[in-house]
Structure formats: C-alpha cells, structure tokens
Image: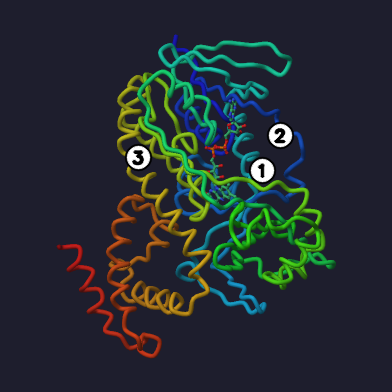
Amino acid sequence: MNQPISILGAGLIGSLLGVYLKKRGLDVHIYDKRSDWRSQQVLSEGRSINMAISYRGWKALQKAGLKEKVEAHTIPMYGRRIHDEHGVTYFQPYGKNDEAIYSVSRNILNQVLLDEAEKEGVQLHFEHKVDHVDVSKNSIDFSLKDGQTKTCKSEVVFGADGAFSSLRTAMQKQMRLNFRQEYISHGYKELTIPATEDGAFAMDPNALHIWPRGNFMLIALPNQDKSFTCTLFMPFEDEKISFDKIRDEQDVVTFFQTYFNDAYQLMPSLTADFCQNQTSALVNIECYPWTVNHCTLIGDAAHAIVPFYGQGMNSGFEDCFILDGLIEKYGTFSWDLVFEKFQKMRKPDTDAICKLAMDNFKEMRDKVSDPRFLIRKKIEAKLHELFPYDWVPLYSMVTFTDIKYSDAYAIGKVQEAVLDKVMSDPFIAQKWENLDYHAILDNVETSRAV
Ligand SMILES: Cc1cc2nc3c(=O)[nH]c(=O)nc-3n(C[C@H](O)[C@H](O)[C@H](O)COP(=O)(O)OP(=O)(O)OC[C@H]3O[C@@H](n4cnc5c(N)ncnc54)[C@H](O)[C@@H]3O)c2cc1C
C-alpha cells in the first residue's frame, strides 16, 4: 500500500492543496507548527490582516468547489480610492464595471479552507514543527509541543510551509539548489479604522484606499465588521521619513496629522496600535529547482514575493490549480513527471510576477497621484474599451485573467513602450480624448512583429 502524502504547512496554500489531493483519493496529512487557531473564534472577530483575492485565486477555489463558501466572507473593491494630502479623494476603477478584487480576512479564509480539508477527510496535525526532512527517503522529523519527537515516512512531501520553508532549508543542504533572498528597504505595520459609532463603514467600502506619499504609503481594505485594516508601508531606516524616526506617541500623531490627516481623524486607537503592533519585513525569495525525488515546494516556500500586486496567495492558489491539472493528466503514480513538468512550467511565471510586484510597488507609492499617470490610465482604459481583446492593460491581465504571468509581463513591456511614446507629447493632457487610437494599436502590432 502507498504511504501517505504529507503537506508541511496548514496556511492558505497547504490547506487548499490538501483539498485538491484528497479529492484525488489520496491519504493526505497536513502538519503545522502552530496550534489549531480555528478554536480562537476568528470567524466572529472578523477583524484581522486581510488580503485581496482576484481571478486566479477564484479559479483555483472554484475547481475545488469552494468559491461560494469563500465568497460569503468577501467584500468587492472595484478600484483604488486615492487620498491626497488635503483629504481630497478620487476613484480609479481597476477594470470594467463589474471587475473587482475581493477583500477577505486571512484568518477566515484559512479557517474555511482547513474546515473543508478536514471535511474531505484530510488528517490535520497541529503543533508538529518540522525539524528536518531527509529528501532521499521522504522522511520527516517533527518536534511536538510536549518536547517529544516523531518521524514519518511519506510517498510525497509538499513544502507549503511559507517563505522560511523547512523543506527548502533541508533541500539546500542536500542538493544543488540555487537560492536568492532579498529584504526590501520597506517594512509594514498593520493599523485599524474601526466602524463609526453608529456601526457603519467610515469610508467607501467598495474600494482599496491608498494614501500615496512618494517613498511611503498607507492602504486600507474593508472588513465585514465594517472596520478597515490599514497597512503602512515605509522604509525601516536611513530615510528622512522612516519607521526609526517615529519614536514616541507624539511622533505618531504628528506624522499622521501631517501626511494622512483624513485617515488620522478615523483612527481613535492609532497611537496604541502603532506602538503595540510590530513592524514586519518584506522579502523576495526565488529558488530552483523546486523539486527533488518526491519532495516539492509550493506557494511562498517556492516563490515569496512582495505584496504590491496582491498576487502572493493568488499565485500560490494557481500553483495548486496547475499541479492538480498535471496530476489529472499523468496520474498519481508519476510524481517525478508531474513535479518536473510543474516546476518547468511554473518557474518563468513566478519569476515574472515577482518582478511585476516590485514594479507595482513603485507605481502605488509614487505614480498613482501623478496627473500624467492618470491620463495614461485613461488612455489605456479607452484602448481597452475600443479594442477589448487586442489591448488589455497589464493590471487587468494579471488580476482579471489567467494569462500566464510571463506572457502578461512581455505584452505589458510592449504596451508600456507604445504608451511612453504617446505620453511624450507635451500636449497630451489636452489631446488624449481625440488621439488616433487605431494607430496606437497598430504600433503594438508592429512592435510585436519586430
Ligand atoms: C502585508 C501582506 C499583504 C498581502 N496581501 C496579499 C493579497 O492581498 N493577495 C495575495 O494574493 N497575497 C497577499 N500576500 C501574500 C500572501 O500572504 C502569501 O503569499 C500567502 O500567505 C502564502 O501562503 P503559504 O501557505 O505559501 O505560506 P504561509 O501563509 O506563510 O503559511 C505557511 C504555514 O507553514 C507553517 N510552518 C512554517 N514553518 C513550519 C515548520 N517548520 N513546521 C511546521 N509548520 C511550519 C506556518 O505556521 C504556516 O501555517 C500578502 C502578504 C503580506 C505580507
């Protein structure tokens, strides 16, 4: 009889993968070092770090039969609401009318996925910390809460244990694995805008709010309890404005009054939140190969990216979708083939989304408030409206389609060059509505042919 399948990590990717594999009739076990956080009533709390689900994530959830269950916990955001330094706001739609990204609490999403995995028959093992994996034998050493240790052998081991994966660490010691890790200069801190006294949202709930301020920015996503989770992204140190310059409560107040005054008015617990909540780092991790023998990395363990395209989880869910398609095609007796195809197929795409995420960071913090950037967005929207199949903006390709990330990246570069040329006209602000849009599209066709 076959040995069980082990998934290391009960996070978002490990739990969705568990559902997929169980549906293929496998004996699936998920291990996590944490205790079972589902008992902590996160569903009723409703407030926690939240994230945006977009098309790729939905597609993967739908194939696992989970779309409706997750949808019930989400709020659609149809565009960015930009807040300038004077408190004036304006709305930039993400796509066409009904196109949205969906805000969801990370805890609730994880809980829905884990409950479903358990219901399908996946065995969940909490308080199992992976200490070591012998990749030549698919053998995993765990340490348990009570100080005991345990060793399990598996048919296959999936490392879904996040950016600091224990499986990847073991692979690095036992094979020739290339690895690149880069902390960016910016960190982030979670803050809160609560519901108003009469229990309403304090701002438009159907938008992702952004306060872009050059080298730093604040964003806010809505929660179902009518609060917003805000995230402040800022350099850790060595800049005129950075986390290390905010030393006490008065600094927090002065900083927020100066740069985010409209948000400040809505944040009664700001100083306490700021001082209590930790400042976390942001890391990019690339590695290759992802697979050896019957062990493979997936999700952040294989490709951790900065969060500025909202694609880390979405790309991890897409990993599960693609892997499941390969299992469907080649069966569960051909793991070598499945894993080889998986990493070859997927790596160029995760490399592309990694680059796009960094590029989008620059766009969110610097450009979204630039009037020329807004004209550029309007020209793109018009091109998309006139030629819906021939010009799809890069953001839409990444967020509202399943075009391979690497193809989206390449097409995006061509479109960027064409738009750079259009925008070089000094009178573009006056002319943009009456441009020869067919000629612009012809330029794309010509560039692609070259
Ligand atoms: C501020 C921020 C905002 C984000 N927003 C978005 C967004 O809007 N949209 C989006 O798509 N993505 C977003 N992301 C990215 C997203 O959070 C990650 O891509 C996603 O959580 C990766 O899931 P994962 O299951 O691979 O890893 P993780 O979520 O890190 O889960 C790993 C699991 O493995 C367990 N584990 C780790 N080590 C061990 C060990 N040694 N033994 C046993 N268990 C172990 C951990 O306890 C954890 O449960 C955001 C990230 C950040 C930081």
Label whose residue precedes the other's in the sequence (3 or 2): 2
Q: Label 2 is placed on what type of residue? A: Trp
Q: Residue at x 40, y 20 (%)?
A: 294
Residues at discs 2 and 1 in contact (Cβ within 8 Å): yes
Position of the N terminus by quadrant: top left
Residue 357 x %, y %: 45, 53
Could you tell me which secondary element the residue under label 1 belongs to?
Answer: helix
Q: Position of residue 180 (x, y in %)?
A: 42, 37
Kindly identify which residue carries mark 3. Answer: 347
Amino acid residing under circle 1:
Asn
Q: CA distance from mark 3 to mark 1?
A: 28 Å
Amino acid carrying mark 3 in the image = Lys
Disc 3 crowd rating (10 Å Cα; few below 14, some 14-19, many 20+) is some
Q: Which residue is mark 1?
A: 107
**Rendered image: mark on residue 37:** 2
- The quarter holding residue 267 reads bottom right
Q: Say which mark, if any, is on residue 312.
A: none
- Disc 3, SS: helix
Residue 227, located in which quarter of the rendered image? bottom right
Q: Are marks 3 and 2 in contact (CB under 8 Å)?
A: no
Indicate whether 280 appears above or below 14: below
